[in-house]
Image (cartoon, rainbow, N blue to C red):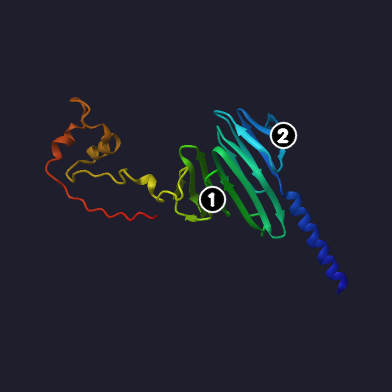
Amino acid sequence: MKYLISITGIVIAVLFIASMAFAEIRVISVKGDAAYKKSGKWLNLRKGQKLGDGTLISTGAGSRAVLAVDKSMLRVKQLTTMKVYAHKITKKGSNTHVGIKYGSINARIKRVGKLKTRFKVSTPVATSSVRGTEENIFYGVRTGMLVHAPSGTVWAGNNKGVFTRLTGDRKFNLPAGKGAPRPLLWWLQDKSWIPIYPDNLTDAEKDFFNNFGGDLGAGPQNPGDVLDQQLEGMASVNLIVNWIE
């Protein structure tokens, strides 16, 4: 029995050591001008090299880099400066923390085996936490931090620890100098959600309206003038929108 227990302990230790060796950030591809800072000097970022904690990465105009964080993928887009604060695997799970000074990244996070996987992205104004999903993060001085969750669940919050849960393709935006983010549907405010036109239009006229409605009335030769002739009188529309704060 003691022999079996010893063998089991050795197997677990070997598996854990293997998982520790798997903890790495590696450059998958580079396009254009991309660099990393080492010992106070900027060097060209190259495919296949490994990056450690404290590495600063920068991409130029029209450039990008793709990094493999264990099984996850991190796409660093153009005009971005980011830093790898920490990346490690322990018995409790995988923990990665990167920061964006300015620019944007796309993170596609996959779980490392059965370990609890945590991936945190921070900016000067806010932080997002990803667990097995995808997110796009942007930070700029005027815009602040913008987080978009195309799928899955992402938690985003200010530096005081107040977090918002993002699902269903929602967007989080915390401008610089603000204590609370904008409403989750802020990007739909003051925009047309659905096309509105008279019921007596033909299908061809409706198609034209959908494609060129914003240009109607630009000149006498505009074929869309037919719409102006049919929009007579007043129309009442009841629309109820509940903004989620």
How would you rate the neighbour count of disc 1 (Cα within 10 Å): few for under 14, some for 14-19, many for 20 or more?
some
* 219 sits left or right of 166 in the view: left
Residue occupied by mark 1: 159
Percent x, y of residue 102: 55, 37
Percent x, y of residue 219: 20, 25
Which amino acid, by three-letter code, is at mark 2?
Lys
Position of residue 93 relative to residue 197, above or below, is below
Which secondary structure lies at badge 2? strand
Residue occupied by mark 2: 38
* 234 sits left or right of 86 in the view: left
- Give the quarter of the image for residue 53: top right
| Front in this rendered view, residue 12 or 161 | 161
Percent x, y of residue 215: 26, 31
Which residue is at a point 57% across and 41% down the rendered structure image? 100
Which secondary structure lies at badge 1? loop
| Front in this rendered view, residue 208 or 124 | 124
Could one spot residue 168 in this view of the protein? yes
Q: Quadrant of the C terminus?
A: bottom left
Which residue is at a point 24% across and 45% down the rendered structure image? 196
How would you rate the neighbour count of disc 2 (Cα within 10 Å): few for under 14, some for 14-19, many for 20 or more?
some
Could one spot residue 110 in this view of the protein? no
Q: Quadrant of the N terminus?
A: bottom right
Which residue is at a point 47% across and 44% down the rendered structure image? 177
Position of residue 17 relative to residue 36, above or below, is below
